[in-house]
Structures are given as C-alpha cells and as structure tokens.
Amino acid sequence: MLYAMIRARLRAEPSDSGDTLLEVVISSAVVGIAAVALIGALLTSITASSEHRSLTVNDTALKSYADAAVQQIQRQASANWQGCAASYTVTAPTNMPSNYSVALSGAQYWTGSGNSGSWTSSCPGATAPQLLTVTVTSPTQVATSVSFVVRKPT
C-alpha cells in the first residue's frame, strides 16, 4: 500500500502553485533591509578610515615639527638655544603638509631642584630647562599638541 501511494504521488501532475504576493513582498523587504544595513556599514567604514588618516597625518606632522625644534634648539653644533627665551623661530621640516598650520608656544621654565619643582612662566636663570609646546592644526581644524623639554647644550 505504501508503495502504491508513492507511485501515485510520482505520477501526479505538477501543481500550478507558485509564490504568493505576500511571500514576494516579505522576501523583498528582507533583502532591502539587509542591503541598507550593508550600505550603512560600508559608509561607516569609509568615514572612520578618513578620520583615522587625518589623525595619522596630524600626528606625523606634530612629531616631525617637534623633532625639528629639538634638533635646531638643542642638538646642533650651532644650536639656537637662548636662555630665558620668550619664543623660538624653528624652520619647519621639508615633509610638513602644506595645508597644516603649526605653532610653537612660549617657553615655561623649570624651577626647583632634584625631583621636586614646577614649570613656571618666570625664568630662574639662563640655564633652566625649558618646556615648549607644539600645536598642529589640520585643514579640518583638528588641533593636536605635544610638549617637550629642551636643555642648554653643553
């Protein structure tokens, strides 16, 4: 009997049934929602990549300028060191991006002895270590700063 039922089923005419309109609409909605989610994720990735690149260029420009400042103020044979300097003029390195602005702030001076003391705006002597701050501003007005200490070359 089971064999007869299977055989009858195999000989049956194919049905004319297809997908209903409701099934087509639901499947189209699911595909549409998935496509919107994927496009949103792609756009977020592109935006984050652009922001990361901008921050990386800021950081590179900042470190390049700070290294150039230390080199010119302290490490060269004819260093630009000035005791109690209000500010320094530093030549920017050649790899600086042209559309970025750089500012070297006025010096602060170490007052104290040994491990205790503080940075102040009044100069205690011509050989006091100086704290300088470099600020780089990108074309999108994102500013990044770094501070470093220079000492009188010996």
Image (cartoon, rainbow, N blue to C red):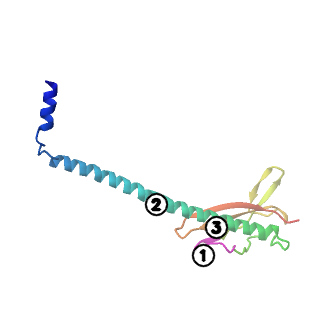
Q: Amino acid at mark 3?
A: Ala
For mark 3, does the 10 Å Cα neighbourhood hold few (<14), some (14 to 19), or many (20 or more) residues? many
Q: Is residue 25 left or right of residue 138?
A: left
Asked whether residue 77 is in view, the answer is yes
Q: Secondary structure at mark 1?
A: loop
- Residue at the spot x=11%, y=46% of the render? 16
The quadrant where residue 102 appears: bottom right
> In this picture, which residue range is highlighted in magenta?
93-102
Foreground pick, 9 / 153:
9
Q: Which is more N-terminal, label 1 or label 3?
A: 3
Q: Quadrant of the C terminus?
A: bottom right
Q: Nearer the viewer, mark 2 or mark 1?
A: 2
For mark 2, does the 10 Å Cα neighbourhood hold few (<14), some (14 to 19), or many (20 or more) residues? few
Numbered label attached to residue 46: 2
User: In the rendered structure, does residue 96 fall within the stretch colored magenta?
Assistant: yes
CB contact under 8 Å: marks 2 and 3: no
Q: Position of residue 110 (x, y in %)?
A: 79, 58
For disc 1, the marked residue is 98
Estimate the spatial distance between the alpha carbons at disc 2 and disc 1, rounded to whole Å.
Answer: 24 Å
Numbered label attached to residue 61: 3
